[in-house]
């Protein structure tokens, strides 16, 4: 079984060679790089495209695209045709009502992405899932991956009404959940193996099934809280409710289906 890391970042401070060494030590076979352009790495999209070209079949990558910009569709076509990437990524603010998410320009963009067979990684929040469900229903062939267990509020108490919006979205078969970023959903981000965050994984498993759950390390930010190997073992060794069959999907098979390699 190939193990696939569905959520990594590659920057100058933590370059690809460092990540590949971590993957080899942990027995991880493939990785999906999520583009993240920032002041220190303004050319991150071009850089991760080099990673894909240098390691075909081992590395896939999704470009960081501002989908709210007027040239978003042109940028997506550039990411596919010029850079050779497998899709695109965007990070949203939890305060954004997403009233622009399905406007005419975005609808054309989503249609083009669906037509091209791309994957989109979205960092959005439970309160935004109503709009997400509209997108997923309107473009059923568009594969959508959600970052970091769909970003639960770790302070939310049972019966978790906000996270229930994430559970409702399981009715859209083209939505995948990345099982990553455990350190962000606890008051003690150093407290491996983050038992208090397991409830979110259990709820996702019950609603989505393992076929739409993709383990991710969140390299390199995860290194501020745990080791790369620990980010894998959180799921592989410390989630006893995941069967061997479940783990085959969560650790690799689901990510292989979520992205065209």
Image (cartoon, rainbow, N blue to C red):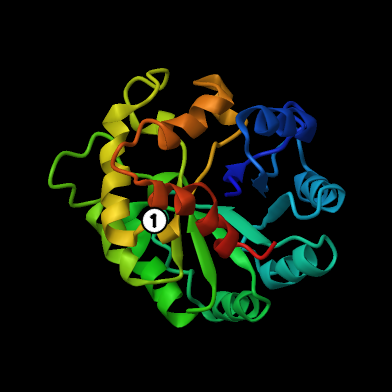
Identify the residue at image location x=37%, y=18%.
Answer: 191
Look at 81% across and 46% down and name the residue there: 51
Give the residue displayed 39% in from the left and 75% down from the top: 134
Horizontal arrangement in the rendering, residue 218 relative to residue 128 (left or right) = right
Which residue is disc 1 drawn over?
A: 210
Determine the image quadrant of residue 208. Answer: bottom left
Q: How many marks?
A: 1
Above or below, 201 relative to 259: above
Residue ID at (34%, 46%): 243
Locate residue 9, reporting x and y percent.
65, 39
On the picture, is 84 further left or further right than 256?
right
x and y percent of residue 129 in the render?
35, 62
Q: Nearer the viewer, residue 124 or 241?
A: 241
Please indicate, yes or no, whether residue 68 appears anywhere in the rendered image.
no
**Circle 1 residues within 10 Å: few <14, some 14–19, many ≥20:** many
Q: Report the front residue among 107 and 59.
A: 59
In the drawing, does residue 40 fall left or right of residue 240? right
User: From what the image shows, is residue 221 above or below residue 134?
Assistant: above
Task: Pick whichever, 178 or 242, lies toward us.
Answer: 242
- Residue 198, percent across and down? 30, 37
Residue 121 found in image quarter:
bottom right
x then y, percent, for residue 125:
38, 51
In terms of secondary structure, where does tag 1 sit? helix
Residue 240 in view in this figure: yes
Q: Nearer the viewer, residue 218 or 193?
A: 193
Q: Is residue 171 left or right of residue 89?
A: left
Q: Quadrant of the C terminus?
A: bottom right
């Amino acid at each position: 079984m190939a193990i696939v890391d569905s959520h990594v970042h590659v920057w100058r401070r933590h370059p690809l060679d460092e990540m590949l060494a971590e993957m080899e030590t942990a027995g991880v076979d493939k990785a999906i790089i999520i583009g993240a352009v920032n002041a220190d790495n303004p050319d991150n999209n071009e850089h991760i495209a080099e990673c894909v070209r240098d390691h075909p079949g081992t590395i896939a990558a999704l470009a960081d695209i501002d989908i709210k910009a007027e040239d978003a569709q042109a940028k997506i076509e550039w990411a596919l045709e010029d850079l050779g990437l497998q899709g695109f990524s965007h990070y949203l603010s939890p305060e954004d009502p997403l009233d622009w998410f399905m406007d005419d320009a975005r609808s054309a963009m989503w249609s083009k992405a669906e037509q091209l067979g791309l994957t989109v990684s979205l960092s959005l929040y439970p309160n935004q899932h109503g709009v997400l469900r509209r997108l997923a229903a309107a473009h059923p062939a568009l594969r959508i991956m959600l970052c970091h267990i769909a970003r639960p509020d770790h302070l939310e108490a049972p019966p978790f009404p906000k996270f229930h919006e994430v559970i409702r979205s399981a009715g859209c078969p083209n939505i995948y959940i990345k099982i990553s970023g455990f350190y962000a959903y606890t008051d003690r981000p150093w407290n491996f193996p983050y038992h208090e965050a397991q409830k979110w994984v259990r709820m996702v498993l019950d609603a989505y099934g393992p076929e739409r759950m993709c383990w991710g390390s969140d390299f390199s930010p995860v290194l501020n809280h745990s080791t790369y190997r620990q980010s894998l073992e959180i799921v592989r060794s410390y989630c006893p409710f995941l069967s061997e069959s479940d783990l085959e999907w969560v650790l690799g098979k689901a990510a292989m289906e979520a992205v065209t390699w």
